């Protein structure tokens, strides 16, 4: 089984697999003949701690890789520090990873404000900030910040895909928008308006913002509900999604509810108001359902994922969560990049590999590829609509693409 799972992983990253040149060894900080030091900051505590489960799952993934001999004979030494989703703590912990722990690169750190807080520092010191977890459009900026590569779908792109779906599903839609007044919320709104084009001012009947520090959004929902909108684009994080849904129900306002993929975590966004009250909520997904054995059970990546979950990640707090799929896919992508580097494990070389990718990522839906060039870091431009069925987000329809 170990061999078959490893073969499956190799096949999944086959889009990267040209034979590395085994020449003289070149190492950057944090690399030896036997180890590669990788660092990450994650919200293991605080308001977005549910996302910390990705880091916890990745720890077990790298243990699996190390048990199989590591990457070209080198074990992964993976250090994760809790930043509580607090940018000041992110700065402190990132400096510790770079200056004290001497990591080779940062991988998969979570959050827009947190990653922005350390982007300049990492780029000035030419430390790769690979596959960071934020869809903020400003991370697609290779000209000014070439060392920072996002590993999540672009919020602006997601807003565009929302608009494409709404125009088909609700051709006479009246859209009310709630958005977080920061790069996250404004990115979604910009994409929505971009794809609606010259219809935007007519179709969007109201758009109101909220501050991340606001205790409630009740007043904003009252304003939006008064428009009688048939679609509610709720560009918020899970806690605010739950508040908005509860107030909408209280007001008797039942539009098509559209939320970001990052908020489509049923335990966090829907459980506080009752799962039954969230049925029909729409979001996007790019991931295979980790519980859908019937549909995906014969695919090599799903088999590899299931074997990892069973042996290494069986204590996961929510085995059905797509966050496990995120952890498996992103960590597999990093391993593929490191493997491709061969014995040239310098920061310059890993950046070169990471900016020339066109690969299918494990546990992502068929047809979705992670594509980067030195001039374009917006790697994902495809997704599928997912609808909450009372238990989970269920994919519907076909892939929707934007260019």
Image: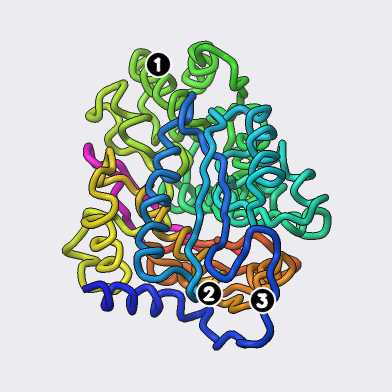
Image coords of residue 178 (percent x, y): 55, 28
Q: Quadrant of residue 337?
A: bottom right
Badge 1 crowding class, 10 Å Cα cut-off, few under 14, some 14 to 19, many 20 or more, is: many
Q: Residue at x 26, y 77 (%)?
A: 4
Nearest to N terminus: mark 2 or mark 3: 2
Q: Residue at x 55, y 86 (%)?
A: 18
Residue sitting farthest toward the left: 294
Q: CA distance from mark 2 to mark 1?
A: 50 Å
Q: Magenta: predominant secondary structure element?
A: strand
Q: Which residue is mark 3?
A: 344
Image coords of residue 87 (percent x, y): 66, 30
Give the quarter of the figure containing the N terminus. bottom left
- Residue closest to the eye, 269 or 356: 356
Q: Residue at x 32, y 55 (%)?
A: 396
Q: Which residue is mark 2?
A: 339
Nearest to N terminus: mark 2 or mark 1: 1
396 falls in the magenta region = yes
Q: CA distance from mark 2 to mark 3?
A: 10 Å
Q: Which residues are magenta?
A: 383-398
Image coords of residue 85 (percent x, y): 56, 30
Q: Which residue is mark 1?
A: 247
Image coords of residue 249 (percent x, y): 34, 19
| Number of the front mark, 2 or 1 | 2
Nearest to N terminus: mark 1 or mark 3: 1
Badge 3 crowding class, 10 Å Cα cut-off, few under 14, some 14 to 19, many 20 or more, is: many
């Amino acid at each position: 089984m170990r061999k078959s799972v490893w073969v499956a992983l190799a096949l999944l990253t086959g889009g990267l697999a040209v034979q590395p040149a085994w020449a003289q060894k070149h190492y950057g900080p944090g690399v030896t003949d036997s180890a590669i030091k990788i660092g990450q900051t994650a919200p293991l505590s605080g308001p977005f701690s549910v996302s910390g489960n990705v880091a916890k799952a990745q720890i077990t993934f790298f243990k699996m890789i190390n048990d199989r001999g590591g990457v070209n004979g080198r074990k992964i030494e993976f250090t994760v520090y809790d930043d509580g989703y607090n940018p000041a703590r992110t700065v402190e912990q990132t400096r510790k990873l770079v200056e004290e722990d001497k990591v080779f690169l940062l991988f998969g750190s979570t959050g827009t404000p947190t990653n922005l807080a350390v982007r300049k520092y990492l780029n000035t010191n030419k430390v790769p900030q690979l596959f960071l977890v934020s869809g903020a459009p400003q991370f697609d900026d290779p000209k000014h910040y070439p060392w920072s590569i996002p590993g999540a779908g672009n919020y602006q792109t997601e807003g565009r895909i929302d608009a494409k779906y709404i125009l088909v599903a609700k051709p006479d839609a009246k859209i009310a928008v709630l958005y977080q007044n920061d790069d996250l919320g404004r990115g979604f709104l910009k994409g929505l308006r971009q794809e609606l084009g010259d219809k935007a001012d007519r179709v969007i009947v109201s758009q109101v913002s909220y501050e991340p520090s606001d205790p409630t959004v009740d007043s904003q929902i009252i304003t939006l509900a008064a428009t009688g909108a048939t679609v509610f684009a709720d560009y918020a994080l899970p806690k605010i999604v739950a508040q908005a849904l509860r107030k909408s129900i209280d007001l008797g306002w039942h539009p098509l509810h559209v939320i970001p993929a990052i908020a489509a975590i049923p335990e966090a966004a829907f459980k506080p108001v009752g799962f039954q009250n969230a049925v029909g909520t729409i979001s996007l997904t790019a991931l295979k359902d980790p519980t859908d054995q019937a549909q995906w059970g014969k695919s090599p990546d799903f088999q590899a994922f299931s074997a990892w979950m069973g042996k290494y990640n069986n204590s996961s707090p929510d085995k059905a969560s797509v966050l496990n799929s995120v952890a498996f896919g992103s960590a597999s992508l990093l391993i593929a990049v490191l493997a491709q580097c061969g014995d040239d494990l310098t920061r310059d070389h890993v950046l070169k590999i990471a900016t020339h990718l066109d690969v299918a990522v494990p546990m992502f839906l068929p047809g979705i590829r992670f594509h980067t060039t030195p001039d374009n870091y917006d790697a994902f431009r495809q997704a599928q609509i997912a609808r909450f069925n009372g238990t989970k987000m269920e994919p519907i329809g076909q892939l929707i693409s934007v260019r």
